[in-house]
């Protein structure tokens, strides 16, 4: 609703606990006006640990990119506070999906599919404050509703990739497929049989017949048929923890 009420040439989204730094709008507005083809300007964003005061560049955002894709198929590439959008771009993307987490990933993927060029600011433009396990992005670890949102977000990303006919040899898509497989095992371990099956099916479709990337899928499918999706997930989690010792 806020986007529809806005009348300005540019749109800034902001999570409640993030900080916009002085000069952000001046640098990004200037960049977008100097580069009329660019539809989104983003900049160096710092993640601040509120307990230690330490800061680091987040999401690998200390380097410029020309486009959102293919990097965005694998993972988010910025925090919500980093980009400044042209109003025309937000109109083309459309509304945000009603989720508690990862709704910005879906939003920017739709911008990527539109082929929106990027402008980059090499100086800090925003700060994201991290409060340990209380961060909203980690809510899925203890909140079933947030976990359901996270599962659906990943399934939606996989569906967008199929609709866009992204090559199964694309490295970023292979990373997505392996993440879907990991999430399927975790969902099973948490007792979410329906979600585990859906994530596993999405992983298989995403990875295709690539023998290197699809390793373990057939064995896990056999284990799930024998033990059930939940017990297979629980055993897989135990095995993963044992390997990390």
Image (cartoon, grey):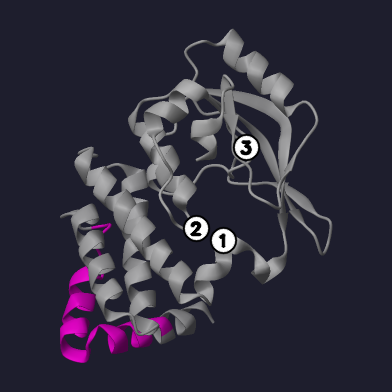
Depth order, front residue of 177/16: 16
In the rendered image, residue 82, in percent from the top left (x then y), is placed at 62, 37
Of the numbered discs 3 and 1, the one sitting upstream in the chain is: 3
Depth order, front residue of 234/148: 148
- Secondary structure at numbered mark 1: helix
Q: The C terminus appears in which quarter of the rendering?
A: bottom right
Whole-angstrom CA distance, mark 3 to mark 1, is 16 Å
In the rendered image, residue 46, in percent from the top left (x then y), is placed at 71, 44
Neighbor class of circle 2 (other Cα within 10 Å; few <14, some 14-19, many 20+) is: many
In the rendered image, residue 76, in percent from the top left (x then y), is placed at 49, 47
Disc 3 + disc 2, Cβ < 8 Å: no
- Secondary structure at numbered mark 3: loop
Q: Which residue, given by chain and number where applicable, does mark 3 sit on? A: 82
**Chain part drawn in magenta:** 212-237
Give residue 101's mark.
Answer: 2
Q: State whether residue 230 appears in this view.
A: yes
Q: Which residue, given by chain and number where applicable, does mark 1 sit on? A: 137
Count of picture labels:
3
Of the numbered discs 1 and 2, the one sitting upstream in the chain is: 2
Q: Residue at x 82, y 64 (%)?
A: 51
Give residue 216's mark.
Answer: none
Whole-angstrom CA distance, mark 3 to mark 2, is 17 Å
Whole-angstrom CA distance, mark 1 to mark 2, is 6 Å
Disc 1 + disc 2, Cβ < 8 Å: yes
Along the horizontal axis of the image, is 86 left or right of 48? Answer: left
In the rendered image, residue 204, in percent from the top left (x then y), is placed at 20, 61
> Measured along the vertical axis of the image, is residue 21 above or below residue 182?
above
Q: Residue at x 50, y 40 (%)?
A: 1
């Amino acid at each position: 609703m806020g986007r529809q009420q806005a009348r300005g040439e540019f749109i800034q989204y902001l999570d409640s606990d993030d900080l916009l730094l002085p000069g952000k709008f001046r640098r990004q507005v200037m960049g977008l006006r100097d580069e009329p083809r660019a539809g989104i300007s983003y900049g160096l964003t710092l993640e601040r640990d509120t307990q230690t005061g330490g800061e680091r560049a987040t999401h690998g955002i200390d380097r410029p990119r020309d486009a959102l894709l293919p990097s965005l198929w694998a993972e988010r590439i910025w925090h919500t506070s980093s980009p400044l959008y042209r109003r025309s771009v937000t109109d083309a993307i459309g509304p945000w999906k009603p989720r508690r987490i990862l709704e910005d990933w879906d939003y920017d993927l739709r911008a990527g599919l539109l082929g929106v060029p990027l402008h980059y600011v090499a100086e800090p433009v925003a700060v994201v404050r991290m409060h340990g396990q209380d961060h909203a992005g980690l809510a899925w670890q203890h909140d079933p509703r947030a976990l359901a949102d996270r599962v659906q977000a990943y399934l939606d990303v996989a569906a967008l990739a199929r609709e866009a006919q992204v090559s199964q040899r694309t490295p970023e898509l292979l990373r997505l497929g392996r993440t879907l497989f990991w999430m399927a095992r975790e969902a099973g371990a948490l007792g979410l049989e329906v979600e585990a099956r859906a994530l596993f099916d999405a992983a298989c479709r995403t990875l295709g017949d690539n023998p290197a990337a699809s390793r373990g899928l057939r064995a896990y499918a056999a284990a799930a048929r024998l033990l059930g999706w939940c017990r297979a997930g629980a055993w897989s989690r135990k095995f993963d923890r044992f390997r990390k010792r």
